[in-house]
Amino acid sequence: MNSSYDSIVAQYGKYGKKLERAWQLVNTQSIKLHRFSPSGRELWTAVGKEGDQLVYEEQPYCSCRDFHYRVLGEKEETCYHLIGLKMAKQLKAFDIIEFDDEEYPQILAAILKDLSREE
Ligand SMILES: [Zn+2]
């Protein structure tokens, strides 16, 4: 893993402390892909200190407080969950959990319920 860490630092070093927290997420297999078939629909979550977060790389969006207050408030560029998600995809270091499309509303509701409990 050392050589991949070096390239990660080269790429994400500018994020400082966030880089370390993101790397922790990747190393503890905390980035999870919930994949639904047959649609291929994907939901990504990051299990951080503050509980599960729903993360969308393309938007970009994260359900954590940091994202809401600092990123949307234009104080920060991104949060560590989003960095972790990018790293995990790059290193292919994430858990894949398979579901049926029928389960999608349930899974999404379960994740959102988790989130509201954090507030
Ligand atoms: Zn976040």
Image (cartoon, rainbow, N blue to C red):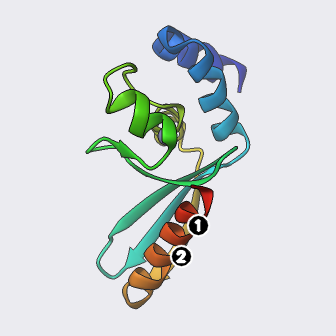
49 up-or-down from 14: above or below: below
Q: Residues within 10 Å of mark 1 (few under 14, many from 20)?
A: some
Amino acid residing under circle 1 = Asp
Q: Which residue is mark 1?
A: 114
Near-viewer residue (104 or 89) = 104
| Rendered position, 18 above or below 101 | above
Residue placed under numbered mark 2 in the picture: 110
Q: Residue at x 48, y 68 (%)?
A: 112
Identify the disc placed on residue 96. none
Residue located 73% across and 44% down the image: 28
Secondary structure of the residue carrying numbered label 1: helix
Q: Position of residue 20 (x, y in %)?
A: 66, 22
The image shows residue 17 at horizontal and vertical percentages of 62, 16
Locate the C terminus and report the quarter of the image it occupies. bottom right
Along the line of sight, the residue nearer the viewer: 41 or 104: 104
CB atoms at circles 1 and 2 under 8 Å apart?
yes
How far is disc 1 from disc 2 in space, using C-alphas? Answer: 6 Å
